[in-house]
Image (tube, grey):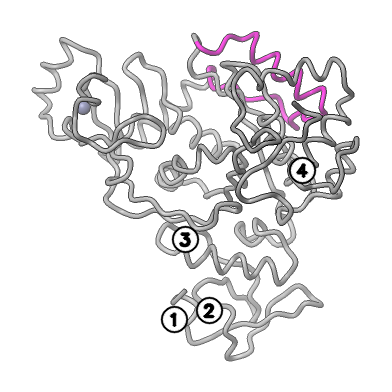
Amino acid sequence: MPHFLCGRIYYTLSRRKNQMFYRGICKNYCVNCGIVKNNRLIALKRLTLRNIMSYAICARKFAVELNMKENDAYNNKERTFVPVGRFAPTPSGELHAGNVLCALIAYLSVKSRGGKFLLRIEDLDAVRCPKVSAQKILDILGAFGLDGDEPPLRQSERGGVYRAKEEILRSKNLVYPCFCTRAQLHASEAPRLGDGGVVYSGVCRSLTEEQAAEKAKMRKPCLRVAVPDSDITFHDGIAGVFTQNLSRECGDFIIRRSDGVYAYQLAVSVDDGESGVTEVVRGADLLSSTPRQIWLMNLLGYNTPKYYHIPLVCDPFGRKLSKSEGDGIAHRLAVSSPERLLGSLAYAAHIIPADVPASLLELTGAFSWEKIPKTRILLPQSLM
Ligand SMILES: [Zn+2]
């Protein structure tokens, strides 16, 4: 934490007025992290990739001591700040208890601070994501009261937006066509990624225009974005500090598939940015995607949201939920009240101390991030 000690002027807090005052030497906050008006630290500076680590720690201290939520500090708007959260299911299968819990936590986090909750259908792959599944998911969320404050975005309808952002990346000379086949990628010695992919070696990055044109006659390329050899560090609200080197640990990644469908990383980054999302709550399986998204969002001029990757949701014995156990939430809704199920989910996430029915309003009052388990969430027997 050297950043705390790098400035000459430090600030201290007035709990009464929720403001920080210049006091000469105080070990808490250095001037480099703050925006100062009339000798008062009114907010912390915007996140940049360079100061993200020190900023995260500083913003956290600031938030804790002022009894503010971290996002207020992150977004420089102490008074007018409205947190915006979202839940973004992929309608390729049924919603399971873990998904609903994630939606619930995302909802409670923003609603407990008067914020806005958005829904987004991540149906980029039209074949895997039939329209009817999306509607089913929206119906289930609606039954729990987890509706969005605006009509849901559907990624399948947003090709034009993604194309415009692809152009921005092209204008920065970061986009190139890749002709490698899946077999070629997997035959290489490249290290494997957590999500089953491989770290791309960048072999197509050095193709000349003529070579690319020649190859394009044989095969439609996907588009990759060239990543820098730099570490991206962020502070996750659950997992803590997370660092990833983009070139070593993920490689140039795909932003558009060879069939013309925009890839997940680009679509998510653009949608979160365009929707003004200030916090992303999702499963821990997406933790390792986050540095790519932070980097893309930064390139495209969006603010970096705060991230919370909630831990794995398990059965009462700590075993990972299998697909077959997961499809029960619609059936359970048919035999239980939404409040009964919400209570059980909230109990699993330690939001309430007993497995009893609870309304969304009650849960909103009971919610705090400190309660959410850090390593795993065990569903109670009543949800199995
Ligand atoms: Zn390639």
Residue 20 x %, y %: 68, 78
Q: Which mark is residue 6?
A: 1
Name the foreground residue: 195 vs 222.
195
Residue 205: x %, y % from top left: 18, 34
Q: Is residue 109 left or right of residue 36?
A: right
Disc 1 CB within 8 Å of nearest ligand 1 atom? no
Q: Is residue 210 left or right of residue 336?
A: left
Which numbered tag is attached to residue 30? 2
For mark 1, does the 10 Å Cα neighbourhood hold few (<14), some (14 to 19), or many (20 or more) residues?
A: few
Q: Quadrant of the C terminus?
A: top right
Q: Earlier in the sequence, mark 1 or mark 3?
A: 1
**Tag 2's secondary structure?**
strand
Distance CA(mark 1)–CA(mark 3)? 15 Å
Foreground mark, 4 or 3, reads: 4
Q: CA distance from mark 4 to mark 2?
A: 33 Å
Q: Which residue is mark 3?
A: 52
Q: Are marks 1 and 2 in contact (CB under 8 Å)?
A: yes
Which residue is pictured at 23% across the width and 19% down the height? Answer: 183
Which contiguous range is marked in magenta?
128-157
Is residue 136 inside the magenta stretch?
yes
Q: Residue at x 60, y 18 (%)?
A: 91
Q: For mark 4, does the 10 Å Cα neighbourhood hold few (<14), some (14 to 19), or many (20 or more) residues?
A: many
Between the C-alphas of marks 4 and 3, the distance is 26 Å
Looking at the image, is mark 4 or mark 1 nearer the viewer?
Answer: 4
Name the residue tied to disc 4: 108
